[in-house]
Amino acid sequence: MIQNQNHPPEASHAQISVLVNGELFRLEDATPTGAQILAAASLRPAADYALVHWPSQGPTSEVGLDEVVNAKTGGPPLEFFATKADGVSYFTVDEERYVWAGLLDEEIVRRIARVNPNEAIWIERKKKEDHPLSAGEVVDIDREGVERLYTRKRSWTLDVQGEKTEWEQPQVVVRDALIKAGIDPTKPWIIILKVQDEAKREVGLDDIVDLTQPGIERLRLRPKDVTNGDGSQDPRRDFSVLAKDEAFLDASGFHWHTQVDGQRWLIVENYPLPAGYNVAVCRVAVDVPPDYPSAKLDMFYCDPPLSVNGVAPGQTEARQSIGGVMFQRWSRHRPEGSWSPATDNLATHFATIEESIGREVGA
């Protein structure tokens, strides 16, 4: 209990404990003033500080320098925050008003308002859409008016083969993700987890994807045990690819072969496409120059021709015959001079392919 009195009562000389900015201090007075609490924490001059009381329940409140705080001897320590500031500001969380001084970010709001980890904190805006506070985001409470915040049950999203799935918990079993996206998990799939700035990796049905980890992008599926397109089970190898490229292709779960037909072609079977295209999978061909990687990889080719709502994407009108099949040429080029033989390879080229195909359908 905090009382505002012009003349503090006589000290009881009973020792009490207080927490100030997380550090424990002991006082010989069970009814200290705000100034005495600051002095016990060696925060001087007291007039330079704002003192905020954080009770075990309910919102924070300001404690004036002459304001008396009643503490129970032998009870748990009262907790305070002290910051060098000219005064305090206010904000609300779910209509309950809090006092604060100094920097206020998402972590502090979550702590002092006791927001459940499974809830998101949203900031209310008058002239634009409300938005959820991200980790580390600072709330400006120095502006005029009271900043209004509210909580909402947190959700996480996971892209599964182009289908956006939403989850109330961040740990998602791969099998459940497939079912939610309408995919039969009993079929023989190769399942690839794509994480930003990391190599793609294969996951199993019983593996767990932690959506709290930064960079989680999508799950992609490829059918197992498909042929290479010419009726044989053994993949065709008219030429060898670099060891690092073979490792990338195998780690990605691609079924692929190489053939020479005027040019050197790498062909990937059953390449998965995001929702919105006329087909779910296609074959992708890449022209691999003899002097690659000194020479860059450029463009790519698709069979069958891809379209969105019956319309072919721009710069895909040209056709290229490969083994008697007419592939659709996607004229997509990296900026001039951006190819580096030291760092670029099939992995970076397929990242360009994935981005180019996804861009057309907003994936």
Image (cartoon, helix red, strand yellow):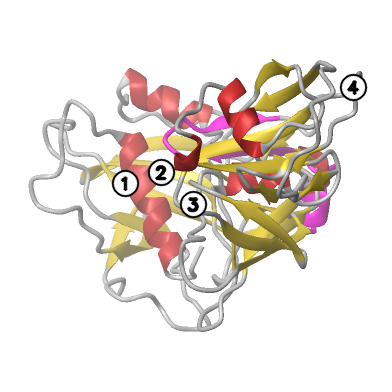
Would residue 334 appear left or right of 147 to someone viewing this image?
left
Task: Of the two numbered discs 3 and 4 on the same chain, state the one appearing first in sequence.
Answer: 4
Give how far across and how far down residue 244 sits, in percent. Answer: 35, 21
Q: State which mark lies toward you, 2 or 4.
A: 4
Mark 4 residue element? loop
Q: CA distance from mark 3 to mark 2?
A: 49 Å
The reply to whether dot 2 and dot 1 touch (C-beta < 8 Å) is yes
Residue ID at (69%, 17%): 24
Circle 3: element type = loop
Mark 3 residue type: Val
Q: Which residue is mark 2?
A: 267
Residue 155 shown left or right of residue 76 in the figure: left
The residue that label 1 is drawn on is 286
Q: Which residues are magenta?
A: 178-203
Counting residues from the N terminus, which is met first, the one under dot 1 or under dot 3? 3
Q: Marks 3 and 4, how far apart in space?
A: 37 Å
* Residue 138: mark: 3
Q: Is residue 194 magenta?
A: yes
Q: Give above or below for 208 relative to 320.
A: above
Q: Residue at x 49, y 46 (%)?
A: 102
